[in-house]
Image (cartoon, rainbow, N blue to C red):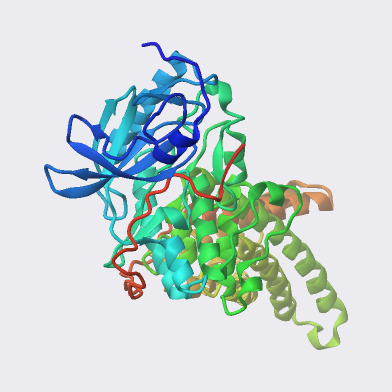
């Protein structure tokens, strides 16, 4: 199929009436009929970088619909047809038109109350049309204006929760929104939030113009979306959702990503609004991380981070991010444990030999040594677990107390049980390690038991890991001729314990309890404030 490539300027009459459409990127005229007489154009709702959206009347069913016409920048209108401009070839346009058709069909297969319903997808005028429901209500952008520029925490979080649920369905079907912002979130009269205007900015561009016609909304698009290269991940939509929440909470659009990359700082939400909790502010800032790998991996993970609800998974993250989390847990915990043990042994020996009030008291010295070793382990683990546990500040305290008590218990057990271990007449390190692991794991379990399912496995894995770690540590230390060998033994022993705990962490899920829905705020709009199906607005920028 051939597409003319000529491009002419638009006359004032064409701009005013839209009737003589030759060469201009102009909307269809009022009264134009599509698919025979099935749809009649009533108004142009918006023109963006990649489509024009209309309100139309469907006479057979007696209802308003929204129709989205694939009409990217660089193309022109010839009569009613969408024709090529200088930046497109027939092959590239045909390829991406097929992709637009396929994406419309995939959207039509997503039955969710939070996703705008696609009634039909068809080809006409050498382009693709998506027929969608015309959502009654008003955009969150308008709602923000009616509420004075920002919303209550309860209202903003309710909107984000519903939007995240809808986004999760979109992502699970291999699609991205790519243009999430307050103007593209509709609120029905019953309070239901609906995603509209699914952008085609990334996938519906010819390879030859990737770096020149990427349309983004400043403040809501992540840095990787500006480049127009590479594959966007669900974390790109997470950035936009976090930016939307930032705007709803603070009344300000976030600093745009290129400016942030250039050194401009983004104030945290609670710096602009001091009544916000640290947790909510930090969750928003994590969603706005410049590095995609530092953001929640998808909408469900972001929702869990923001809401911290009992019904959310403790580590509701993608497999890749889970592996990164477990890796950080292992190396940070091992390093903290070794540092704590070194400090504990040094202070414990000093206390036993020099402190008069501890003279002759090996148990007191071991308690001090265990407390310091536990503090090192507890603080290191807190650094990785603090985002996932409520009252995480208790973790170092419980770990310190558990390690101190466990060390003393292990010493007492060792004094009583002088068994042979691997042919040597030594203290039963496997038994003492198990005793220490039991107390340590039990202390940490006190914090886990109310928050995760199968928390008792933590005690078992800690006990087995510490027992095996003790055996390995003593074996390596006994075979070494120098002090560095003993330190290596401690490091390997600590690693065995941490690996056992990491294995348990990999299967943790938070205890389930249905969350009460937040009430929808009262409708602040009149009957004339109808759906705004804009594809682009004054915040859009073409690069």
Asked if 209 appears above or below 249 in the picture, the reply is: above
Query: Residue 338's x, y, as percent?
Result: 72, 58
Q: Is residue 272 left or right of residue 93?
A: right
Within the image, what quadrant is residue 303 found in?
Answer: bottom left
Query: Residue 15's x, y, as percent?
Result: 46, 37
Asked if 322 appears above or below 95 in the picture, the reply is: below
The residue at the far left in this view is 60
- Residue at horizontal 34%, vertical 56%? 531
Asked if 325 appears above or below 97 in the picture, the reply is: below
Asked if 372 appears above or below 457 in the picture, the reply is: below
- Residue at horizontal 65%, vertical 58%? 333
Q: Is residue 461 visible in this depiction of the protein?
A: yes
The residue at the far bottom in this view is 357
- Residue at horizontal 39%, vertical 68%? 158
Residue 522 versus residue 380: which sits nearer the camera?
522
Within the image, what quadrant is residue 212 found in?
Answer: top right
The residue at the far right in this view is 354
Q: Is residue 201 left or right of residue 409?
A: left
Quarter the N terminus occupies: top left
Query: Residue 429's x, y, as percent?
Result: 61, 61
Residue 363 versus residue 72: which sits nearer the camera?
72
Q: Is residue 322 left or right of residue 20?
A: right
Q: Is residue 471 visible in this depiction of the protein?
A: no
């Amino acid at each position: 199929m051939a597409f003319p490539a000529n491009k002419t300027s638009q006359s004032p009459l064409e701009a005013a009436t839209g009737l003589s459409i030759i060469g201009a990127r102009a909307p269809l005229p009022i009264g134009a009929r599509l698919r025979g007489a099935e749809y009649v154009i009533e108004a142009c709702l918006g023109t963006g970088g990649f489509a024009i959206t209309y309100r139309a009347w469907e006479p057979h069913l007696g209802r308003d619909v929204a129709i989205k016409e694939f009409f990217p920048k660089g193309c022109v209108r010839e009569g009613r047809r969408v024709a090529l401009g200088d930046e497109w070839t027939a092959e590239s346009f045909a390829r991406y038109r097929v992709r637009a058709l396929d994406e419309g069909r995939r959207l039509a297969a997503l039955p969710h109350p939070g996703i705008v319903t696609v009634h039909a997808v068809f080809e006409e005028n050498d382009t693709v049309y998506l027929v969608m429901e015309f959502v009654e209500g008003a955009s969150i952008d308008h709602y923000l204006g009616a509420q004075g520029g920002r919303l209550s925490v309860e209202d903003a979080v309710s909107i984000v929760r519903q939007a995240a649920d809808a986004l999760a369905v979109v992502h699970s079907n291999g699609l991205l929104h790519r243009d999430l912002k307050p103007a593209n979130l509709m609120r029905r009269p019953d309070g239901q939030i609906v995603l509209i205007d699914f952008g085609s900015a990334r996938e519906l561009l010819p390879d030859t113009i990737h770096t020149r016609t990427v349309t983004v909304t400043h403040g809501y698009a992540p840095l990787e979306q500006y480049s127009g290269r590479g594959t966007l991940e669900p974390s790109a939509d997470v950035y936009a959702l976090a930016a939307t929440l930032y705007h709803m909470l603070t009344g300000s659009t976030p600093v745009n990503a290129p400016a942030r990359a250039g050194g401009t700082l983004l104030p945290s939400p609670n710096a602009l609004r001091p009544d916000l909790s640290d947790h909510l502010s930090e969750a928003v800032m994590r969603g706005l991380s410049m590095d995609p790998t530092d953001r929640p991996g998808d909408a469900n993970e972001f929702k869990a981070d923001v809401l911290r609800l009992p019904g959310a998974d403790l580590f509701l993250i993608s497999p890749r991010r889970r592996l990164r989390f477990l890796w950080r847990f292992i190396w940070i915990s091992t390093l903290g444990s070794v540092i704590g043990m070194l400090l504990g042994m040094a202070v414990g020996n000093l206390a036993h030999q020099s402190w008069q009030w501890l003279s002759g008291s090996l148990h007191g010295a071991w308690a001090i040594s265990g407390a310091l070793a536990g503090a090192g382990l507890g603080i290191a683990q807190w650094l990785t677990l603090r985002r996932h546990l409520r009252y995480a500040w208790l973790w170092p305290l419980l770990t310190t107390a558990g390690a101190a008590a466990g060390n003393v218990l292990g010493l007492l057990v060792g004094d009583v049980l002088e068994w042979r271990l691997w042919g040597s007449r030594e203290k039963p390190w496997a038994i003492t390690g198990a005793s220490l692991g039991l107390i340590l794991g039990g202390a940490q379990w006190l914090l886990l038991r109310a928050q995760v399912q199968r928390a008792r496995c933590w005690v078992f894995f800690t006990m087995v890991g510490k027992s095996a770690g003790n055996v390995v540590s003593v074996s390596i230390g006994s075979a070494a001729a120098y002090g560095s060998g003993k330190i290596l033994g401690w490091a390997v022993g600590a690693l065995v314990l941490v690996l056992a705990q990491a294995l348990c962490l990999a299967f943790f899920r938070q205890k389930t309890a249905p969350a009460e829905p937040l009430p929808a705020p009262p409708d602040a709009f009149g009957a004339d404030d109808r759906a705004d199906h804009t594809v682009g607005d004054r915040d859009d920028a073409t690069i």
